Image (tube, rainbow, N blue to C red):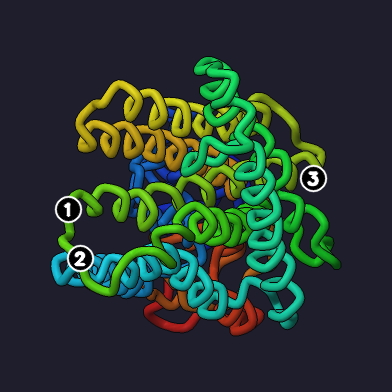
Amino acid sequence: MRCDHCANDVPDGVFCTRCGAHQGTTGELRGAKTREQNYAAHPSEHVVQPSVFTTLFPHLGRQKVHEFRWAFAVGIAGIVVLYVAGLIAAAILVAIFLVPVLYLIYLYEAQVYRDEPATVLGFTLGGGAVIGLALTLVERAVYNPFSGVGNPLRSAGVAAGTVLFLGVLIPVVQEVLKPLPALFLPKRTDFPETVDGLVFGIAAGLGFSVSESLVAFSSALTGLPAHLTPGNWIYDLATIAVFQPLLQGSATGLVAAAVWRYRRGRLAGREIGGLAMAVVAHVAFALGTLLLKDMAAAQLFVLVWQAVVVGALLIYVRYLLHHALLEEAAHMGFAETVCPNCHMHIVASGFCPNCGMALTAAPAAVKRARRPASSTPAGTV
């Protein structure tokens, strides 16, 4: 059939396998081409749906996403059990490593690093952890919330200075330094797609999050008794298990994705907005948390604020990635493959004609299994 939008001859299907547009909607040209109701990495979702796993784990098919959701749920349940049992130090450690470990498993599962896992993981996760350790130690040398000795901000009694330092300066500096491991990745030309930059940026951000949380809670990890009354630790555990790593990973991934787009010659409003969104969201997260705690607001309100900021950040990540996938899905040549999202046997180029998934976001194993289409087998799309 001839695509209604790009005028190429393509296999019959709901979506054009060349441009990704929704077919049969010529009267709604703009909406059909941008198809924001069908997120390019996971077409069963809308672009503005703040889903964690389909945003930060874009290479996973529908079934694999469910497996990671279950693994995350089991991890959260484990943290709750440790909390109820009074094993707070153990709960803190599990909370700090839960999301980064899941992401490490995802990187191996999707093989986004091609054939160089040590180099990619060392520069992204490892590099982010090193920067996080160095920057957090410098921050603590300037401002230590557990001591008034040697603390210039506290000794001077400048509350506004403390707020600006912790709520504005530190987040901005972090967003400048966190993406460096992904941006200076060796052989980064082997990873040209924006989705690669996003994933490597998220990995660097999660590595940073591990070091930041370990330093922040070092006193608790070394000073708490083996067993104690749970108290209100559940709120801190929720922040370090969910919201803190999601903020650091999403913001860094957004910056890296915007830089990847710039390297491809694209620096329009979406990319500039991505850089601004990463900084603004991080400042809002840190500043809002600091002010709410200073006003002695209910800790549940603090978590709600953190969830709102992280949700907005995730939506912008999806928005940028969606349009990048639509624009970067160059004609890959028609090939027989199995869509990792809908599991249909298809003859496709850049998009699955059945569900509309951008095949540039498919796991490496699926890409390697593509076979040139000499003929279309019966029953394929």
Q: Between disc 1 and disc 3, whose residue precedes?
A: 1
Q: Dividing the picture into quarters, in which one does residue 139 lie?
A: top right
* Residue highlighted by disc 3: 264
Residue 226 showing in the rendered view: yes
Q: Between disc 2 and disc 3, whose residue precedes?
A: 2
Of discs 1 and 3, which sits in the foreground? Answer: 1
Q: Residue at x 20, y 31 (%)?
A: 298
Could you tell me which secondary element the residue under label 1 belongs to? Answer: loop
* Residue highlighted by disc 1: 231
Task: Find residue 85 and report its horizontal and vertical position in percent.
Answer: 15, 71
Give the class, few, some or many, for how many residues have Cα within 10 Å of label 3's Cα (few <14, many ≥20).
few
Q: Amino acid at mark 2?
A: Leu
Could you tell me which secondary element the residue under label 3 belongs to? Answer: loop
Q: Dividing the picture into quarters, in which one does residue 50 lie?
A: top left
Task: Find residue 121 and report its horizontal and vertical position in percent.
Answer: 67, 72
* Residue highlighted by disc 2: 228
Q: Residue at x 55, y 16 (%)?
A: 158
Task: Find residue 70 and report its horizontal and vertical position in percent.
Answer: 26, 71
* Image vertical order of residue 118 relative to residue 103, above or below: below
Q: Is residue 132 left or right of residue 300?
A: right
Looking at the picture, tell me which residue is in the foreground, 161 or 317. 161
Q: Residue at x 55, y 31 (%)?
A: 166
Q: Quadrant of the C terminus?
A: bottom left
Of discs 2 and 3, which sits in the foreground? Answer: 2
Q: Amino acid at mark 3?
A: Arg
Of discs 1 and 2, which sits in the foreground? Answer: 2
